Amino acid sequence: MHYKGNRDREKFWETFIRLREDPHIQELKKYPNHYISNLYDHSSRVALCAYDLSRRLYLDIDGRSLAIGAMLHDYYLYQARHNEEIRTKDHWFGHPDTALKNAEKEFQLSELEKNIITSHMWPLTFRHFPRSREAVLVCLADKICAFGEGVLKRNYVRMQRKQGR
């Protein structure tokens, strides 16, 4: 059992590092996310948070799929806040399907990885239920990271106001 956990940790790190260097993933740097970040940084934080949760909860996970699903969960490739064609509600409910369609064009995905991507907004996307530990971890990690990014944004705005900008 310890061997499997160590091997899956290695698979997570190997996959995570390889994906962060992938030119398709590098494209995520172009798209702002939660005002203070971009999709590349957000997805990296979600992957690391999901991995950390798996370790803290002593869960056996598929490290490779966890890294892939987390890094591609927001692979929707548009600016959500400045896209007049896409309303906020449409983005919240629709971007997991868009992320999956885009990811399938560039990457070979397992059914586990597809579910991680499509279910990360659950329960908003009620029909896409997380069906694995990895999908639940990414769903939780995405909410944790989005909350943290929201707090950072609020603190940044307060600081700007104090400085009169």
Image (cartoon, helix red, strand yellow):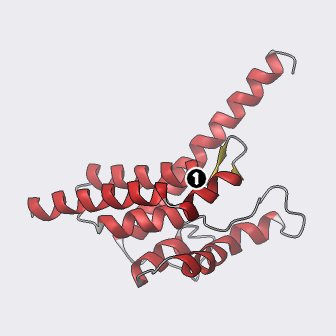
Quarter of the image where the N terminus is located: bottom left
Residue at the far right: name it: 84
Position of residue 53 relative to residue 8, above or below, is above
Q: Residues within 10 Å of mark 1 (few under 14, many from 20)?
A: many
- Residue 156, percent across and down? 71, 29
Q: Give the residue at mark 1.
A: 40
In terms of image quadrants, where is residue 125?
Answer: bottom right
Given residues 9 and 106, the one toward you in this image is: 106
Q: Is residue 147 left or right of residue 81?
A: left
Q: Looking at the image, which is closer to me, 103 or 80? A: 103
The residue located at (47%, 62%) in the rendering is 70
Residue at horizontal 64%, vertical 51%?
29
Residue 142 left/right relative to 125? left
Horizontally, residue 26 falls left or right of residue 35, namely: left
**1 relative to 145, above or below:** below
Find residue 151 and report its horizontal and vertical position in percent: 63, 37
**Direction from residue 90 to residue 72 in the image, left or right:** left
Disc 1 marks a residue whose amino acid type is Tyr
What residue sits 39% from the left and 54% below the top?
17
Work out whether residue 10 or residue 98 is closer to the camera in this orientation and state it. Answer: 10
Secondary structure of the residue carrying numbered label 1: helix
Which residue is at the far front? 23
Quadrant where the image shows the C terminus: top right
Provide residue 64's location: percent of width, then percent of height: 33, 67
Name the residue at 59% across, 46% down: 147
